[in-house]
Image (tube, rainbow, N blue to C red):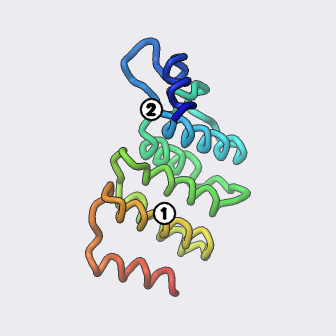
Amino acid sequence: EALERIVGEEGFLQHSSSESICTLQQCTFAAFVAKEVEEMGLVLPHSDLNQLGTMQFSSYARALRRNHETYTLKSRGRFLLLLVEMGTIHGQPCDRNFVLSILAELHRLHLPRSLLLASERYINFVNSGDGEILDRKEINNCLTVLIQ
């Protein structure tokens, strides 16, 4: 609370040109995304933490996937897991088909650890009330993919 108050008083997380304010939670996630993206050798759309924190992460995740779909990354599982994390941000719209397509790709590439972590992230997101409720058949399909 104290850190958030100081950051707010100093205006570190406020856009000077608009009313958009990046919360501490958003900036923390943006810093995580920036670190992961830079470590993978990919390009960030902004260098400003406030702009990163207020962007639509699911749109950026789609762009990353589209631009690096055929690119051989050192850690494909890490890349796809990051896309799932970006697509399941609390308070932002979730593109369920996009996330499920990444889960299917993780299964196709035989990356069980990344698939398990991504599935856990997605199910936690859905259970938090931010995502669309999965019906029993969809949950069973996800579990079947994990077990195979």
SS at mark 1 in the image: helix
Are there few (<14), some (14-19), or many (20+) residues within 10 Å of tag 2? Answer: some
Q: CA distance from mark 1 to mark 2?
A: 21 Å
Badge number at residue 25: none
SS at mark 2 in the image: helix
Are there few (<14), some (14-19), or many (20+) residues within 10 Å of tag 1? Answer: some
Residue at the far top in the pictured view:
17
Residue for point 54% across, 74% down? 108
Instruction: Name the amino acid, label 2.
Output: Thr
Residue 88 image-quadrant placement: bottom left
Q: Earlier in the sequence, mark 1 or mark 2?
A: 2
Residue for point 67% across, 42% down? 35
Q: Nearer the viewer, residue 9 or 26?
A: 9
What residue does disc 2 label?
Answer: 54
Residue 48 image-quadrant placement: top right
Residue for point 65% across, 46% down? 36
Where is 46 relative to 131, above or below?
above
Where is 37 relative to 23, above or below?
below
Q: Position of residue 102 (x, y in %)?
A: 48, 63
Q: Position of residue 1 (x, y in %)?
A: 51, 35
Q: Position of residue 125 (x, y in %)?
A: 40, 60
Residue at the far front in the pictured view:
2
What residue does disc 1 label?
Answer: 121
How many numbered markers are drawn? 2
Residue for point 72% across, 45% down? 39
Q: Nearer the viewer, residue 18 or 69?
A: 18
Q: Position of residue 37 (x, y in %)?
A: 64, 44
Instruction: State yes or no: discs 1 and 2 in contact (Cβ < 8 Å).
Output: no
Instruction: Name the amino acid, label 1.
Output: Arg
